[in-house]
């Protein structure tokens, strides 16, 4: 029966000759290791360079591997025939089996966890593939799903900005570019050089966005009030036009007096 400590000691002391391989019954590896020793020794003498250290290093690496290898794994690899030949070692075989099943269970658990994370990343990867294939609408759908899983992904926001810029949807493109920078996207050279953002950069508001530290400018209170006044004025003008239209229909006899009053009340008090 081979012992792990003996194999490790032989690898440390005589690993340069590959003695530990002969001890473990790996004769082919042992002769290859020994042949490497003689070749490196001749090269060392002729070239006056320490090539002889190569087989020694290989032996030392084996020494380390033997030390860290669990005893059950060592026995499973080098003592499997011994364990099968002696019935009294059933307990050890059972321990080896349990150890193997434990490792397989751990691997399955790791794969299961990896699969559970995969859909989140797959939407982003799928969107990038579609983006590269010029399927902009398909890429937007996948990127939206990726953002639903992780809204703070700056790269996905940047890609969304590129897609909407290609579709010439300025507001959506600027919104996602603002979020990309907000969540850590700092590759400003790409923002200014990407062909996908060419449409976005042609708009005057992009310059304001850049001057405002790559953030969407917020309206000042007085600017917002002025904007609201304009909207209300437009609403009032539109209401007067609609009432005038109703009056014209009444004069033509299309609407009765009651119908005219009813429609006017609906416009004034929606």
Image (spheres, rainbow, N blue to C red):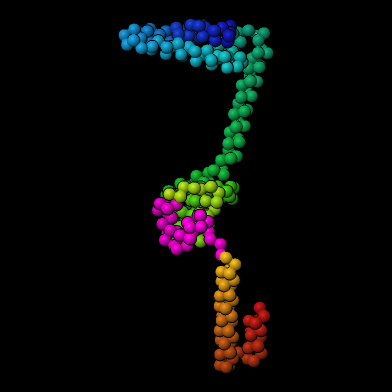
> Is the magenta region chiefly helix, strand or loop?
helix
Is any part of residue 91 visible from this angle? yes
Above or below residue 237? Residue 181 is above
Residue 54 image-quadrant placement: top left
Let me know if residue 92 is in the magenta part. no
Number of dots carrying numbers: 0
**In the picture, which quadrant includes the C terminus?**
bottom right
Between 258 and 4, the one nearer to me in the picture: 4
Q: Within the magenta stretch, is there residue 207?
A: yes
Q: Which residues are magenta?
A: 191-219
Image quadrant assignment for residue 42: top left
Q: Is residue 83 left or right of residue 155?
A: right
Residue 100, horizontal then vertical, whole percent:
61, 21
Which residue does the image show at 60% across and 89% down from the upper left? 255
Which residue is at a point 54% across and 53% down the rendered structure image? Answer: 179
Question: What residue is at 34 percent from the left and 10 percent from the top?
Answer: 48
How far across and how far down the image is residue 222, in percent?
58, 69
Quarter of the figure with the N terminus: top right
Determine whether 83 is above or below 260 in the image. Answer: above
Q: Nearer the viewer, residue 110 or 57?
A: 57
Residue at horizontal 54 percent and vertical 43 percent from the top: 121
Residue 169 showing in the rendered view: no
Q: Position of residue 209 (x, y in %)?
A: 49, 58
Q: Observer-nearest residue: 193 or 97?
A: 193
Q: x and y percent of residue 256 in the render?
A: 63, 91
Is residue 14 found left or right of 97 in the rendered image?
A: left
């Amino acid at each position: 029966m081979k012992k792990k400590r003996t194999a490790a000691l032989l690898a440390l002391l005589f690993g340069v000759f590959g003695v530990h391989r002969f001890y473990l019954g790996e004769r082919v590896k042992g002769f290859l290791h020994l042949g490497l020793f003689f070749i490196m020794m001749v090269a060392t003498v002729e070239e006056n360079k320490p090539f002889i250290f190569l087989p020694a290093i290989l032996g030392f690496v084996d020494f380390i591997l033997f030390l860290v290898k669990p005893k059950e794994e060592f026995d499973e690899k080098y003592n499997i025939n011994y364990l099968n030949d002696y019935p009294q070692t059933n307990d050890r075989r059972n321990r080896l089996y349990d150890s193997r099943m434990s490792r397989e269970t751990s691997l399955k658990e790791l794969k299961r966890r990896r699969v559970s994370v995969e859909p989140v990343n797959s939407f982003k990867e799928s969107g990038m593939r579609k983006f590269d294939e010029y399927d902009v609408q398909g890429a937007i759908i996948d990127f939206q799903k990726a953002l639903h899983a992780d809204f703070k992904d700056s790269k996905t926001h940047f890609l969304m900005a590129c897609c909407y810029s290609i579709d010439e949807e300025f507001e959506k493109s600027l919104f996602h570019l603002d979020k990309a920078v907000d969540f850590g996207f700092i590759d400003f050279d790409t923002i200014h050089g990407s062909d996908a953002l060419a449409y976005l950069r042609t708009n005057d508001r992009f310059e304001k966005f850049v001057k405002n530290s790559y953030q969407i400018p917020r309206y000042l209170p007085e600017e917002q009030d002025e904007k609201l006044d304009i909207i209300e004025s437009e609403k009032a003008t539109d209401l007067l036009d609609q009432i005038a239209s109703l009056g014209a229909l009444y004069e033509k006899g299309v609407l009765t007096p009651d119908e005219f009053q009813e429609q006017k009340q609906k416009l004034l008090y929606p």
